[in-house]
Image: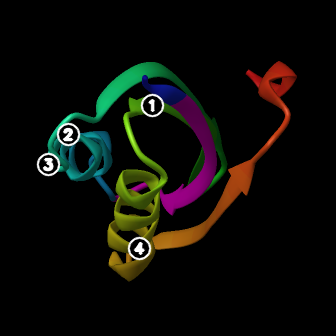
Amino acid sequence: MSKIFFLKIIYRNAVNLHKITSIVESVKGARIKHLNFISKGKEFVGVIAFEASQLIDFERIFALIRTNRDISDVEQITDASVC
């Protein structure tokens, strides 16, 4: 059974959103359900919701996104009403 996870991400304007989405989709079984990013000056701020079958898949995606130096901040959101 799959579960939906939410991440709040802040990244520099120069970064392509495709890099972030490809990180999520690189993990087998993970699918993006929702993207909501807006430009705030020199940065984009938003939420990505994705479906993963196991918690370990979420942890792997979280770690991969955090290793990207172009991303300023990433944190898990537990309240789905943020989207």
Circle 4 — which element? Answer: helix
Circle 1 residue: 50
Residue 17, percent from left and from top: 32, 42
- Report helix, strand or loop for mark 1: strand
Q: CA distance from mark 3 to mark 4?
A: 13 Å
Work out how far the residue at label 3 is from the one at label 2, CA to CA, in angstroms: 4 Å
Badge 3, how many Cα within 10 Å: few under 14, some, many 20+? few
Q: State the SS at label 2.
A: helix
Contact between labelled residues 2 and 3, with CB atoms less than 8 Å apart: yes
Q: Earlier in the sequence, mark 1 or mark 4?
A: 1
Is 7 contained in the magenta span? yes
> What is the CA distance from the residue labelled 2 to the residue labelled 1?
9 Å
Q: Residue at x 18, y 44 (%)?
A: 22
Highlighted magenta segment, given as a residue range: 4-14
- Asked whether 73 or 59 is in front, the reply is 59
Amino acid under disc 2: Glu
Of mark 2 and mark 1, the one earlier in the sequence is: 2
Q: Which mark is residue 26?
A: 3
Among the two numbered marks 1 and 3 on one chain, the one whose residue lies closer to the N terminus:
3
Dot placed on the residue nearer the N-terminal end, 3 or 4: 3
Q: Residues within 10 Å of mark 2 (few under 14, many from 20)?
A: some
Q: Which residue is mark 4?
A: 63
Q: Amino acid at mark 4?
A: Ala
Residue 70 occupies quadrant: bottom left
